[in-house]
Image (cartoon, rainbow, N blue to C red):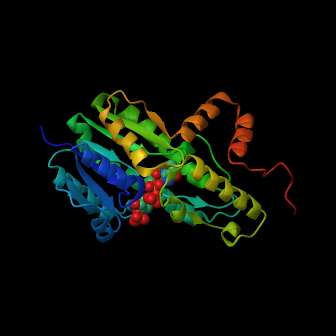
Amino acid sequence: MSTPTVLVTGAGRGIGRATVEGFLAEGWKAVAGVRDVDAAQAAFAPHPNLAIVHLDVCDALSIASGTAAARQFADAPLAAVVPNAGYAVMGSSEDTDLDVVRQMFETNLFGNAAVMQHVLPEMRASGQGVIVCTSSVGARLANPLLGMYHASKYAMTAWAESMALELLPFGVRVHLVEPGMVNTDFPMATRATGAIAQGEGPYAPLFGELRDGFRSWRERLGVGASDVAEVIVATALDPRAPFRIPVGSDAIEMTAARAKLDDAAFHRWQMDFLGMSWGQERPEE
Ligand SMILES: NC(=O)c1ccc[n+]([C@@H]2O[C@H](COP(=O)([O-])OP(=O)(O)OC[C@H]3O[C@@H](n4cnc5c(N)ncnc54)[C@H](OP(=O)(O)O)[C@@H]3O)[C@@H](O)[C@H]2O)c1
């Protein structure tokens, strides 16, 4: 039997890179799909089972050439794919720049879906394979000012669930890994739009509270990229893994609270979790 190969999108850093390293440690071949090949070549330790390919999930030509290169390196149908590329947009629902949001959906949802369209026919025909999507606990709840990011992750859930059912008779599993706070460059890659980006407008105090709440959340409970990668690899290896897998004590606690509480009670719980007082007093006009 040939060595199984995984393709990971957004593999230049963070969770994607740790996932590539995790599969290599398991003896797999791994294809790191990245936007900056030179930077990735400098970042990864050279490994005979590693291929680094240009894969911008928003660029149709890059998707075609990157997935073809992955297939060639695998020398067999891919055994696993990790749709992972993603980032967040922040802004109030009143004035979030919807063009910036469309771009984000292009990466988080459509881009990863386009990659799957290139590799899925062969995977299905091979009668085996596993897709482990990097989702988020943010596909179970929505924080203020991040509605469109959460929408992209909720959308990923719907896409993945539908794909899981479609693929049932073909031996291809689909899973969603749902981390809470992870210590990566993610906050630096987050794009603020609208008035809050200038620290202005009626939601500026909310932005400040949210930033403080996230900072404290990160300090108290943030896990490492390799902790998430470990779960992604374990999920790929375990034929009995559940469909949705929270990662981190925060994600487990939030998922349990969401399941237990009604929406209004959960919203209070969530603001308490973040240490936020927003909405307890009306903001000044
Ligand atoms: N960090 C968290 O707290 C957290 C929590 C839950 C879920 N997640 C999810 O985990 C995934 C990975 O995030 P991370 O925390 O590892 O953040 P990260 O360190 O910022 O990594 C994001 C990766 O996505 C890549 N990317 C962005 N746009 C792309 C595109 N058009 N084509 C290909 N790759 C692209 C980036 O590539 P470049 O290096 O070229 O920019 C980078 O490698 C995301 O889907 C995110 O939503 C993160």
Q: Residue at x 58, y 52 (%)?
A: 219
Taking the image as shown, residue 192 lies to the left or right of residue 43, namely right
Image mark count:
0
Quarter of image, ligand 1 = bottom left
Q: Position of residue 52 (x, y in %)?
A: 26, 61
User: Residue 77 appears at what percent x and percent y?
Assistant: 20, 44
Q: Is residue 148 visible?
A: yes
Q: Position of residue 237 (x, y in %)?
A: 30, 35
Residue name at image x 75 percent, y 36 percent: 264
Q: Is residue 144 left or right of residue 46?
A: right
Residue closest to the eye, 47 or 238 = 47
Among the 4 quarters of the image, the one containing residue 146: bottom right
**Res 117 seen here:** no
For the view shown, which residue lies furthest in the front direction?
A: 220
The residue at the point 65 percent across, 49 percent down is 143
Quadrant in which the N terminus is drawn: top left
